[in-house]
Image (tube, rainbow, N blue to C red):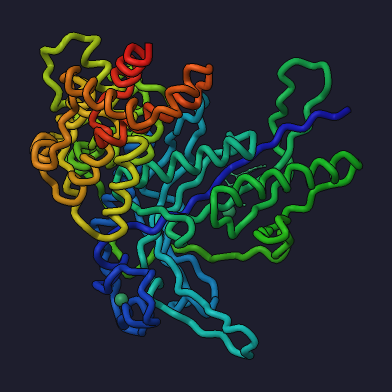
Amino acid sequence: MINFLPVIGLEVHAELKTKSKMFCSCHNDPLERHPNTNICPICMGHPGTLPVINKEAVRKVIKTGLALNCQISEHSKFDRKNYFYPDLPKGYQISQYDKPLCLGGFLIIDGKEIRIRRIHLEEDTGRLIHPEGADYSLVDFNRAGVPLMELVTEPDIDSAKEARSFAQELQLIFRYLGVSDADMEKGEMRVEANVSLLQLKPKTQNPKPKTLGTKVEVKNLNSFRAVEKAIEYEVIRQKGILGKGKKVIQETMGWDDVSEVTFSQRIKEEAHDYRYFPEPDLPPLRITKEEVLRIRAGVPELPQNRRTRLIKEYKLEPKAAEVFVTNKDLGEYFEKTVSEFDPHLSKEKLQSLIKLATNYIVTDLQGLLKGALVAGEDFLITPENFAEFISLIYEGKITSKIAKIVLEEMFKAGADPSHIIEEKGLVQMTDEKEIEEIIKEVISQNQKAVEDYKKGKENALQFLLGQVMAKTQGKVNPETARKLLLTKLK
Ligand code: ADP
Ligand code: ZN
Ligand code: MG
């Protein structure tokens, strides 16, 4: 049995979030629905026009490079990549060839270092639309000239799952940095996977040979699922070929999301010669140490750090921490809430409050927050009010049933919880005499159930308890009610 080790390298494109396009002042909005509205003579490549570098885009790439432990090139430049395609109005793409902005970084995935070869800056192309059944195609240039960042890894990834985790972590980092929304469905982030297999000789220890196998490049991966599935498929396909003693052909492949297969697009012999040369219309870039320091100061806490910190600082379960890491806003909300708790409380009490807050945020609040976001409404529950709400539950002032009503009111009106409780008369009943009165009533009105209970029917007790809860509108602690009911029934 021959052993094969998958060898995978990723190329990731991300559209940068800037106000204007890469080399002109056109609005950067590739999702604009009216075709060809965000265009001008520069991004349309009219003769005699001159591009101007978007500094913000350069800074965003450098920021990404710093977050990914890259070296930032002091000297960098743009190059022309020449090819013809109808979505490329100039007949060339301005990109970076031998002097990219960032070199040699890494990202750690599940304890393993994946090296990043380079990150460079280029411009996006337009978009072709092929109306169904028509014998023509349409072209929309809104996206042409949008700043596009390309990141290339070394072939350090060795499974489909790892490739997916890498891409997902990268998306999260782009979002934390605010450099790209990186939504794969919207084409803001696109992944290409290079896949080959290494033949490992049986028995020998660590037999990783120095020369890699022939790779194929899979394009059009528009979701994380597609990244994982396409690589899985390629690994199996190539194992089949090599297992039969045949050779893998170096080619560019597409991914069919419906049939879940890769298919050949072009083989290496037809590969392009892009005739790269330095872009004569743009000055070379010189990036000063001061500028790099300024950009570094703007790099926020990154997801991996936040993940470990949340677990350590708040003793969160990894699952809850993950929710707060992937939903950055929710995580910030959580930390603000915790900071509202009285720091002089005992450690145990503080920890219980944190746990309670975590549960409510992950279950109830998360949905409310998303709802407000989707509706474009302000979120009215301040962390301060929410912290108070959690304290009220913790102290037993409101039952979990009442808590739902209070939270709903806080969401609608933005009032503080003690206000709502008072106004709506939702204070928990604590006077046992008062509760006993109600229990007496329930017992006298439900004699049949009482007899059933005495005959040993457990359901009857649940029924009576339900009656008590209903009569008190949920304002009595269910445990207390149960205890008092049992004594009365005796
Ligand atoms: P190309 O010139 O075909 O673009 P590169 O050497 O520039 O190839 O690498 C492009 C991507 O392919 C990188 O992410 C790199 O890590 C990956 N790669 C290179 N060789 C292999 C290989 N044999 N197997 C898998 N991935 C590879
Ligand atoms: Zn333009
Ligand atoms: Mg390539």
Residue at x 62% of width, y 45% of height? 228
Extreme residue in the bottom direction? 135
213 on left or right of 445: right
Image quarter for residue 46?
Answer: bottom left
Q: Position of residue 257 (x, y in %)?
A: 65, 59
Rendering coords of residue 61 (x, y %): 33, 49
Q: Quadrant of residue 118?
A: top left
Instruction: Please identify the quadrant where the C terminus is shown.
Output: top left
Task: Identify the residue at horizontal 38%, vertical 70% (top origin).
Answer: 31
Q: Quadrant of residue 339?
A: top left
Residue 79 at least partly seen: yes
Question: 393 or 484, which is in the foreground?
Answer: 484
Q: On the picture, is 99 further left or further right than 353?
A: right
**Is residue 74 in sight in this rendering?**
no
Q: Quadrant of the N terminus?
A: top right
From this view, report whether residue 220 is shown above or below residue 82. above
Q: Nearer the viewer, residue 85 or 416?
A: 416
Above-or-below relation of 137 to 445: below
Horizontal and vertical percent position of residue 139: 48, 82
Taking the spot 31% from the left edge, 58% from the top edge, the residue there is 374
x and y percent of residue 439 in the render? 28, 24
Position of residue 429 in the picture relative to residue 117 (left or right) = left
- Ligand 2's quadrant is bottom left
